[in-house]
Image (cartoon, rainbow, N blue to C red):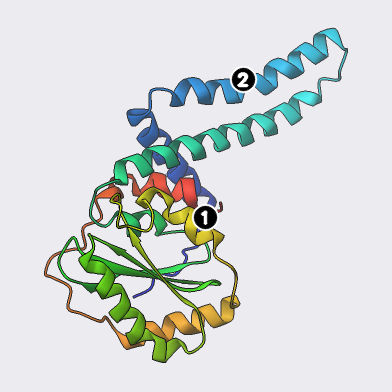
Amino acid sequence: MAKQQEKETFGSRLKTIGMAIKFTHQRDKLFLPLEAAAILLPFAIITALVVFAKFSLIWFVSALFVALLAGLIVLNMRTSKVVNKEAVGKPGAAYALIDGIRGWQVTPGVAALSETQMVHRAVGKAGVVLLGEGGGKVRKLLGQEKKRISRVVGSTPVYTFLVGETASDDFSVTEVRKRLMKLPKNIDSKDANHIAKRLDALGIGMAIPKGPIPTSANAGKGARRAALRGR
């Protein structure tokens, strides 16, 4: 079933950011130095302006907001880099990296050949996107799934991509989010929600093998949400 966007409270956002900081710090040696530089630099600049150019102390309030923004930008960039790097080559990575992107309703494993060869579905303003992962055999599965849902979505565009790190794939798993966001807007949010509900009612195309869908990249689920939500 397509995952709806969850509303976050201020407290839950702070918790998510904390998870992202911990997750990224454990895997990226450059994170803390870059984060510290991003936060301290605005204060250093304002201090110099206050001392030497006689700026008002009220400018430190602006420095605080700039420092917070710079810190979040660095956190966003470094967390995304770590998550993308860890996702490469792991089953379920395509779904793990797009789960939680604002404006998209994502359903994992709508069709599958095995626990590592499957198709995920995302519905947004671009239309319907089918993402296959697991090798060349999945390309045929993508075509079958597109044909199956085309009678339900009518003239709504259906995009199919094979994601992975081989020459036969359309692009790397690390590019999934960027590719989705670059697609043209073909329908509005209301139509996207309607289509997602109709596709949910249609069910899955092929029986998914027993066991949970392998989403190894979920080790950084909280970090991923902090990095991707709102971008």
Q: How many marks?
A: 2
The correct choice, above or below, for 175 with respect to 106 in the image is above
Q: Nearer the viewer, residue 121 or 13?
A: 121
Front label number (1 vs 2): 2
Residue drawn 23% across the image and 63% down it: 136
Disc marking residue 171: none
Q: Position of residue 149 (x, y in %)?
A: 37, 85
Horizontal arrangement in the rendering, residue 200 relative to residue 39 (left or right): left
Q: Is residue 175 visible?
A: yes
**Circle number at residue 40:** 2
In which quarter of the view is residue 153 placed? bottom left
| Element at label 1 | loop
Cα distance in 3D space between marks 1 and 2: 28 Å
Crowding at dot 2, Cα within 10 Å, few <14 / some 14-19 / many 20+, comes out as some
Which residue ends up furthest to the front in the rendered image? 167
Percent across and percent down for residue 48 are 77, 11
Residue furthest toward the top?
A: 52
Residue at 53%, 66% in the rendered image: 103
Residue sitting nearer the eye, 61 or 27:
27
Among all residues in the image, which is located at the extreme right?
54
In the rendered view, does 87 fall on the left or right side of 36? Answer: left
Q: Secondary structure at mark 2?
A: helix
Three-letter code, disc 2: Leu
**Label 1 sits on residue:** 9
Q: Position of residue 182 (x, y in %)?
A: 55, 59
Q: Nearer the viewer, residue 82 or 57?
A: 82
